[in-house]
Amino acid sequence: MRAELITIGDEILIGQIIDTNSAWMGRELENIGVKIRQITSISDSKPEILKTLREAENRADIILITGGLGPTRDDITKGTLAEYFGVGLKIDSAALENVVAIFNRFSMPLLEVNKKQAEVPENCIPIQNSKGTAPGMWFEERGKIFVSMPGVPHEMMAMMQDFVIPRILETGKLPSIVHQTLLTAGLGESFLAKKLEEIENQLPSNIKLAYLPKLGQVRLRLSGMGPVKSDLEREVEEQKQKIIQCIPEYIVWIGDGTLSQAILEKLKSSSKTLATAESCTGGYIAKEITSIPGSSQVYLGGVVPYSNTLKTRLLGVKEGTLNQYGAVSEETVREMVQGIHEHLGADFGIATSGIAGPDGGSPDKPVGLVWVAWGNRNRIEAKKFQFGKDRLVNIERSATVALTHLLSFIKEEE
């Protein structure tokens, strides 16, 4: 079964907002065995919408549309769909009740334009909006499925999860599909591919291996498709184990986890704690860690000592160290980790200091130079990295290498 995604809205075309809907929908549809044929972004133009619908109907089995369902004049998707199918509009009573309830909840006056949001084409099955006012619409015409949903991401996601995906699954036209994911760190995509070349060459024709790189990390995804799910699960599991045995030192997490998640699980199992001291990363590592539910069981907190004064006051970094070696140095980050143990009381610590850019460098310490340290009360390690001139990339790379080395350190300590 092939799908085409259509996003409608001038705001997408001019870059005012980023189309995250298509990426999310693509992942969800792939997980149930629906292949994306094409993604198209178009303006709020009736001729353009009609033309795109005709083209999509010729290419795909399912056409999923987001955007253009608001109450203003530029939201023309609903009327255009009615014209495309040659039907009129009608008020859906359940949708109207939802609109009235929302406006009553916030004690807001209900305008006529808001009531019109409950209108839907006569030939559709309305999809109730649990997160907003505009209903979605499900059409089955000429052997094809058309679905129109709001462009607001959380409204669209709720409709997809509660109504659209279950109804697609009910068609009975989808193959079984199985995904297995491995997160790796410490080895680039091309080097991983070289190590896994023999395994990849011997994969069964119904199983594919995808490399999904991110700064300092590569996620490996095995995807299998076939008629019998139990057989497929066994085949994919066998291939996953082969990969784990081939590159055990680079496997960070088995499943859809993160570096931070792997570290937290390791420390939680040993009842150890963690704290961070971030200069050049400015709290990015703390953000990564605290995005994981339950991180408070392990993570005590962190400091962002941008100035030398705070490095000294909060972490006990010696003034002599800063004067002799500078803030961006091995000596300073080692003392920052030591300060984590002495002043913050954590069992494990990470410290970063560098020149994120795009300026502020010198011949001796150019932009992109970063020192990272990690360790526990008994041992501290540090390493120098030279990245590029992109500030945000440097911050993310620094965080990734810090977390990667800390995880390896924890494994060694075990």
Image (tube, rainbow, N blue to C red):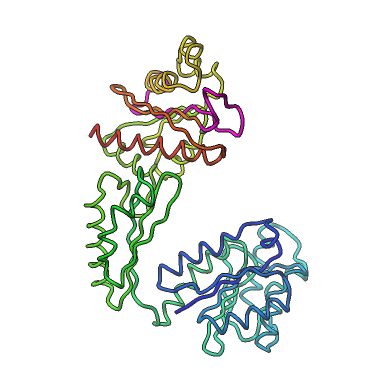
Does the magenta segment cover residue 348? yes
Does the magenta segment cover residue 335? no
Query: Which corner quadrant of the image does residue 52 belong to?
Result: bottom right
Q: Specify the principal SS of the magenta part.
A: loop
The image shows residue 6, relative to residue 131, as above or below, that is below
Count the marks: how many? 0
Left or right of residue 320, residue 207 in this image: left
Q: Residue furthest front?
A: 363
Residue range corresponding to the magenta coloring = 343-368
The image shows residue 113, relative to residue 337, as above or below, that is below
Residue found 76% across the figure and 62% down from its top: 109
Quarter of the image that includes the N terminus? bottom left
The location of residue 81, given as percent across then percent down, is: 66, 80
The location of residue 206, given as percent across then percent down, is: 31, 72
The residue nearer to you, when weighing 215 against 72, is: 215
Query: Which corner quadrant of the image does residue 128 belong to?
Result: bottom right
Left or right of residue 166, residue 132 in this image: right
Residue found 37% across the figure and 52% down from its top: 190
Residue found 23% across the figure and 52% down from its top: 246
The location of residue 280, given as percent across then percent down, is: 52, 30
The image shows residue 296, relative to residue 125, as above or below, that is above
Q: Residue furthest top?
A: 320
Left or right of residue 13, residue 59 in this image: left
The residue nearer to you, when weighing 226 against 143, is: 226
Quarter of the image that includes the C terminus? top left
Left or right of residue 249, residue 109 in this image: right
